[in-house]
Amino acid sequence: MLSSNYSTRKVCHLCEAVKYGAGPPFDDFGAGACHRNTSRDHNSYMLGFATPPPLSLIPGFQLCMLVCDPMHCLHLGVLQWAVGNALVLLSGEGRWGVFEGQRKHKLDKSLRVAYSEFQPWCRCRAISTSQPVFTANSVNRGESPNSFPEFKGKASNTRWVTMWLCDVLYHIGPRTEAALFWGLCEMLHIMHVFPGPWLTGRVAQRFARACRVALLSYGCLARAAKADCLPLWGVKPKHHQLDHLGEVVARTHLHPGYAWAFCDEDFNGRICKVAAACMHPHVFSLRVLEKYSLKVRLSLEDARTDSVNPPWKT
């Protein structure tokens, strides 16, 4: 319900970027993009509401507290579009074989071979994933050849598919897609390997540079596809938010994973397991809270016992 959001013409709550019409375009990722000179401050942000949201009325609230969640912006956003496009394009180029038959059948066959390469790549690196076999439906090309590719996978799985594709493109040779996936994988490496909540200045600049390389490469591919009237490389508001994330990391050195939702999603899964054992609708919420509280108490008791009588003493 932000006044500037994904669904409106003014697409960004941080600047004056627009999807169309008068104003700085949201899909300009260059260092000199016009929207970089239109950053909103807290007061101008608040003036955009006829009735301010209740959370914004909490004493001490500032616009800078609205932070980007890389899990939904990158893993379940930019990565999904990049992976979907790469799989469709490489299949069309015959990277995983040339097959006969209808379009969907040929794409399914090619993606099945791609999956047979992805699995041993993961095993060689001791990577465990729950990723099912790639299909035309999983890249949004099942029903229509004119739909924009989008990989359908879990956040953690999409991360590994992205890194595998980076390897594939590296061995094919220099091309814009390889630059895109290098930038994406460099960001993933920093987010998942470097500890937080702060990065060194050098690492923060590395992240910002990788973000810029990835977005400029994606934008180049998107413009080429649009010029050729091809339904490929669609640019979304999440690309624009990722651009802002790179700037924020470079300026503040805050670890980009500081505010991501991986822990929240994991907690949701734990609560679902607890809730599955609660059968009475009229006391359902109470029982979930009681069972979860009991589990936390037992975990604390176990931890206390281990600290008093550590295993190495027995």
Image (spheres, grey):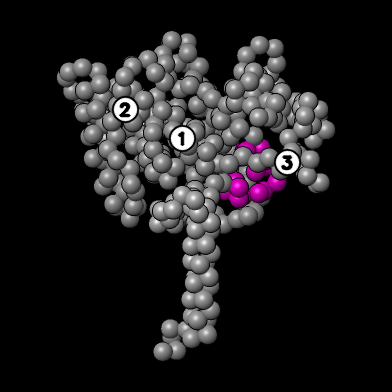
Q: Would you say residue 244 sits in the magenta stretch?
A: no
State which region is magenta. 245-259
Question: Residue drawn 78% across and 44% down?
Answer: 58
Helix, strand or loop at disc 3? helix
| Residue depth check, mark 2 versus mark 3: number of the one nearer the observer | 3
Q: Sort mark 1 into few (<14), some (14-19) or many (20+) by Cα contacts within 10 Å.
A: many
Q: Main secondary structure of the magenta part?
A: helix
Q: Residue at x 26, y 47 (%)?
A: 120
Counting from the top left corner in percent of width and height, residue 102 is at: 21, 17
Q: Residue at x 54, y 36 (%)?
A: 73
Which circle, 1 or 2, is nearer the viewer? 2
> In this rendering, would 193 be left or right of 134?
right
Disc 3 marks which amino acid? Leu
What residue occupies the far left of the structure in this picture? 100
Q: Name the image quarter holding the C terminus.
A: bottom left
Q: Residue at x 47, y 13 (%)?
A: 226
Residue 86 versus residue 72: which sits nearer the camera? 72
* Residue underneath mark 3: 55
Height in image: 84 above or below 301? above
- The residue at the far front in this view is 282
Q: Give the label on residue 137, or none.
A: 2
In the rendered structure, the answer to whether residue 44 lies left or right of residue 5 reads: right
Q: Distance between the Cα atoms at labels 2 and 3? A: 40 Å
Tell me which numbered mark, 1 or 2, is placed earlier along the sequence.
1
**Relative horizontal placement of residue 180, taking residue 60 as reference (left or right):** left
Percent of width and height locating residue 126: 33, 55
The span from disc 3 to disc 1 (Cα, nearest Å) is: 31 Å
* Mark 2 residue element: helix
Q: Quadrant of the N terminus?
A: top right
